[in-house]
Amino acid sequence: LNPVAHTIQLATLAYPQQISHLEESEDLALRSGGDTLLAECVERWSHVLEDRTTDAIAHLYPGITSGDRIPIAYIWCRTVTCSNPRCRAEVPVVRSWWLSKRQPEKSAAIRPVVTSKGTLSFAIAFGDEIDFDPGQGTVSRGSVTCLACDQVSPASHLKEQGCTVGLGERIMAEVYVVPGSTAKQYRVVSPEEERLVSDLEYPNGTTPEGVSWTPQESLPLNDSRAIFVHLYGYKTWGSLFNPRQAHALVAMCKVLRELHPEILTDALNSKYSEVKARQLADATVVYLALMIDRLADYGSRQARWRATDGERAMNTFGRQAIPMLWDYAETFAFNPLSGNIAKARSAVIDVLRYLPSDQRECKVLRASADRLPFDDGYFDAVITDPPYYDAVPYSDLSDFFYVWLRRALGPVLPEVFSTPLTPKRAEIVQNAAHEKDAAFFEHGMERALAEIARVLSSSGRLVLVFAHKSTAAWETLLRALLASGFVVEASWPIETEKATRMRANNSAALSSSVFIACRKRTAAEEGFLDDVEPELNTRLHERLDYFWTQGIRGADFFMSAIGPAVEVFGRHKRVVRLSGEEVTIAELLDKVRTIVADYALQRIVHGEAAGNVDEASRFYVIWRWAFGTADVDSGEAIHLSQSMGCEFNELASDRGVLNKKKDKVSLRGPAERAGVKGLGLPSATGVYAPLVDVLHEAANLWAGGERQELADFLVESLPSGGADRMQRLAQSIVDVLAPGDKERSLYENFLVGSRSLPTPTTQDAVTENQQKLF
């Protein structure tokens, strides 16, 4: 349905097969070496694209015209007027001043210079000249500090100015190399160079199809989950690029349009038929357009400069979102080092060299999944990776790439790029911004899966890929799957995500996707819960044993268990209690959580008596194991607490281990609970506190050096044998936390140091016995 995804399908599935038989042509006039024909054509014409575009935009880059340097990137910052009416200075909104921080002697940083009149300029400090903290920028959590008067302007001030008169921008530094060298150097641009860019207007005019060269299509203005630059005044896709960036991309699109007839003529002159020559020309231009899109990814106002790991510009989509970015790197597309056309070229050509080719042409159609243009029983297998519920606003984000593909490929794929933006109405997702709720997603998935069932042969197989950390998403998908007449035969978690991706940082994001193999259901009988439950336990423990040996842990472990559970559950038309009441998918998932949590806890405490630990402490260990320090949706937190026998409201109270903020929940460690009065002490009725409360208070007392108070506290707070259980709890948490984690280090020190505590102030035989356990 999505034109961007469809274009990628053409490039990976259709064009290589279409062009493959031209390899056997007697006239190989277009070929110059041992590469595939497509790879050679893309290689050749990409250099023409580079040369002609460089000629068209060189005057915008002074270093190119002078010949004394080649720009790699320009480091920009947004600016805002100070909210102090007595100041009103120009304030740079900067996250970090670092340019290079790999080696102290070769480090470089931007030094802001503010005069008594509030005039702002910049200088570069190198090595020992860096006598300030470059990591301390002016912006924190959206608030910005004025360098002239120290006034702190809130995020609302930036938003107001952005939406009324617009945020300003300044070039702070240029990163460049001299011809013949790869050593990066840094300089401040001259006032004339800065004026060249600040006076530059966006490209005007329209394409032959009447589309403005600078993308005027609107950003989604009512969705702030993944795209929220509009809150600061950026309202069109074109506004994500500064004027010089826009000129570079527009120039590439114009040159590409000029190249298409030249490539076609070249192919015809090589005696290919008109049909085959056009296929070759169209395919070559599509690959070049994808290269332009890759350069757009590195060439927007959302590309960050990375001062470590090679000092380079990062791409816009470090994660599936477009957040507000304060300082950014404007790359020169034809620089010799990074974020350049050479990288884009190799990314395309390396794939072309290895894509399978076959004389049988692949047929790629663009259609909606709930209206498939195929006969009943047409396929033996359907493999699909459907939208992940509410995880990603796919069509909204793909518009970033669509607007440039539309300008580059309008004449080549007019039917694909006929709409202003990608289709939204029929997209099967949950997205409140498009008035699509969970019911919309579920009904859409039911229609799509019913269509798959229709076009699948009676013995055919469906393989469905899904990854979402929320079991609510799984519940919605599984209801649709079972309602469409499918039964799960097998499921496999497969690691599909990079551990180093930005999305993985401090989040509960999954690194695995679950591949679910299904067939059409043939059984029509009901199953009774009393019979299904033992099967469920047996199958889950069998698969959990395997998943554990494969190193699957945390949130992935929970998700991996869903498939095997549905294998058992879906063998029946429905599962009912003896009373006739149907067991819902939600109830099944609660059972899965309970089984997985108990299984994991037994493994974490190495088979020791996990049942001797209270529910709140068990919950704490499992949360740390599954989610670490990440925020989790409140619905998921509620389900997990219920499945482990805990009351969510108690866990999320002022004294509890959970911190709830809007619809997100995080776990409170000992540091976050340090101010809780009476934490870990028995209640007025003599009921002992949860063991995790005792551990947190004890660890805090240890960290504070209160050794005598700690000894007395343990005597008062722990029952007979409690010290041993608390030690095992602390060690279990240590085992699930990463090395270097502050909480882990605290427990490690506490476990060692608590063995030599002073004698408690009040002591009897029982407490003396407790003390020996340390």
Image (cartoon, grey):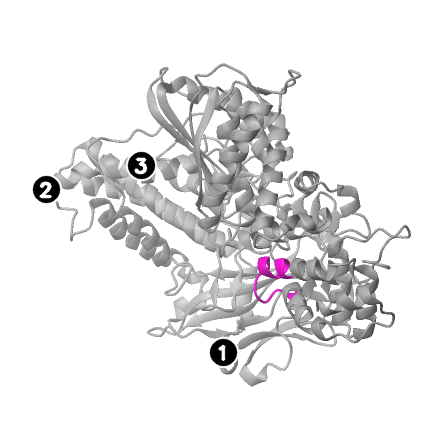
* SS state under label 2: loop
Q: Residues within 10 Å of mark 3 (few under 14, many from 20)?
A: some
Residue farthest toward the front in the current orientation of the protein: 765
Q: CA distance from mark 3 to mark 1?
A: 46 Å
Q: Nearer the viewer, residue 167 or 360?
A: 360
* SS state under label 3: helix
Q: Is residue 39 depicted above or below 702 in this figure?
A: above
- In the rendered structure, the answer to whether residue 655 lies left or right of residue 330 reads right
Please provide percent x and percent y for residue 7: 38, 37
Q: CA distance from mark 2 to mark 1?
A: 55 Å
- Comparing labels 3 and 2, the label whose residue is closer to the camera: 3
Question: What amino acid is at disc 2?
Answer: Asp
* SS state under label 1: loop
Q: Nearer the viewer, residue 391 or 330?
A: 391
Magenta span = 731-742
Question: What amino acid is at disc 1?
Answer: Gln
Which label sits on residue 484?
Answer: none
Q: Residues within 10 Å of mark 2 (few under 14, many from 20)?
A: few
Q: Quadrant of the C terminus?
A: bottom right
Which label sits on residue 27?
Answer: 2
Image quarter of residue 181 = bottom left
Residue beneath the point at 60% across and 70% down: 97
Image quarter of residue 273 = top left
Please check the rendered image and state whether residue 512 is part of the magenta-colored stretch, yes or no. no
Question: What amino acid is at disc 3?
Answer: Leu
Q: Nearer the viewer, residue 547 or 101?
A: 547
Residue beneath the point at 66% across and 38% down: 222
Q: Is residue 458 visible?
A: yes
Q: Which residue is mark 1?
A: 103
Q: Is residue 96 depicted above or below 719 in this figure?
A: below
